[in-house]
Image (cartoon, rainbow, N blue to C red):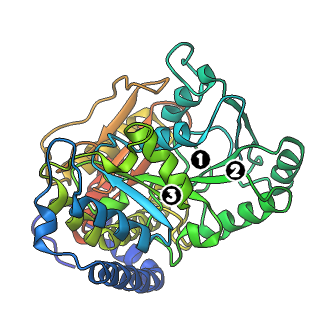
Amino acid sequence: MKNHLFAIDEKILNASQEALSMCSEHFSELEKIKEYQQQKMLKAFQKYHVSEAMFSGSTGYGYDDRGRDTLDMIYADVFDAEDAIARHNFVSGTHTLTVALFGMLRPNDLMLCVTGTPYDTIQPVIGITKASGMGSLKDFGVTYSEVSLKDDGTVDFDAIKEAVREKHPKMVYIQRSKGYALRPSLRNSEIKAIVDAVREYDRDTIIMLDNCYGEFVEWESPLSLGVDIMAGSMIKNPGGGIAPTGGYIAGRADLVELCSYRLTTPGTGRELGCTLNVLREMYMGAFNAPIAAIEAVKTAVFASALFELLGFSVEPDYRTARGDIIDVITLGSEEKMCAFCRGIQAGSPIDSFVSPTPAPMPGYDSDVIMAAGAFTLGSSIEISADGPLREPYAVYLQGGLSFNTSKVSVMLAAQEVMRNDL
């Protein structure tokens, strides 16, 4: 392949061509998933008669906002849910999950996380860290327990069964993605196995899934596999790189209703909430979401293949079917982490001239470096890379609205990491 537009070393170009060849079979399967999910989204738009009139938005209380309410139905439809709320009011994935947790849990309820300790920003919400007096679940009398993962990072199904049999928690909580851990992200098959393990001993506990980064990357929705309710951020997969903010909660209708009372107020719930001027972008984002999600997965698969060729440890490898859009590349040093992020930033459409540097970040216990040349601030469905500067110095790569451009970012990151060896 000729490349006259970017100054990429011939060794990286050759390795990239080899990586593309290695990925071809996986890419073919991903294209099939993308086509199915796109058609499913199109069918939902047609089913609910989406029209130009729905994009105008509302002000004030937002009563009778047809565009808002129809968007809810579309997300419910494509996620195989009884109901959903999709709102720009959610400021992040953590906020969306927080609304869901506070909506469903009550004093003396037990929340049991079965995928080890959740990631950094949700810990203060639960009351695990730095949360005394801040209004955490713990402050409101909700208790917490967890089932550790096995030493290899996989789910301990026997321990889950024992914990559910002994404790009968109000909620079993599943975190699909790895956060800043090295464990594998969960695929639908593992989520279904967790559901089956829980239901063997408790038919009533609420099974909740943190589905961030996992939407549209597999054939099925977790809700069709027995999950009761799930939530995620619209500046990740389900916003398609177009929604400027927001999140969704989808699942059982009675549970979604409880969550809506925490989003606004008990008694008013989803009936309130104006949409201002964001509905057009939210509809466009939903429609584009299956494309963006699979382009991001292709970027991750390619990065795994390339960095494996270059001698680095990657998780998952390029052969492995994915449950989300995230790659973990263990680089072994702070210097190489910073080099990787410089390369991703240099290949980004926005702020490509900026050099990322480590800095403290709220919710994290060490400095974090982040490359994010995105149209939407913090959007991780767009090409981005980040990680805490702590051993084993692993960088987390996610996103990529277009594989053809994201591939350039990954190649530039490889070149920066390998600069002394070229």
- Camera-nearest residue between 91 and 180: 91
Neighbor class of circle 1 (other Cα within 10 Å; few <14, some 14-19, many 20+) is some
Q: Is residue 214 left or right of residue 170?
A: left
Q: Earlier in the sequence, mark 1 or mark 3?
A: 1
Q: Is residue 108 left or right of residue 408?
A: right
Residue pointed to by mark 1 = 182
- Camera-nearest residue between 331 and 110: 110
Q: Residue furthest front?
A: 267
Residue pointed to by mark 2 = 153
Tell me the residue at 38%/82% (across/down): 40
Residue 88: x %, y % from top left? 27, 48
Residue pointed to by mark 3 = 311
Q: Is residue 190 left or right of residue 256?
A: right
* Count of marks placed on residues: 3
Residue 356: x %, y % from top left? 25, 35
Q: Earlier in the sequence, mark 2 or mark 1?
A: 2
* Disc 2 versus disc 3: nearer the observer: 2
* Whole-number angstrom distance, CA of label 2 to CA of label 1: 7 Å
Q: Is the Cβ of the residue at disc 2 closer than 8 Å to that at disc 1?
A: yes
Q: In the rendered structure, which amino acid carries the disc numbered 3?
A: Gly
- Mark 2: secondary structure: loop
Q: Earlier in the sequence, mark 2 or mark 3?
A: 2
Q: Looking at the image, can residue 411 be seen? A: yes
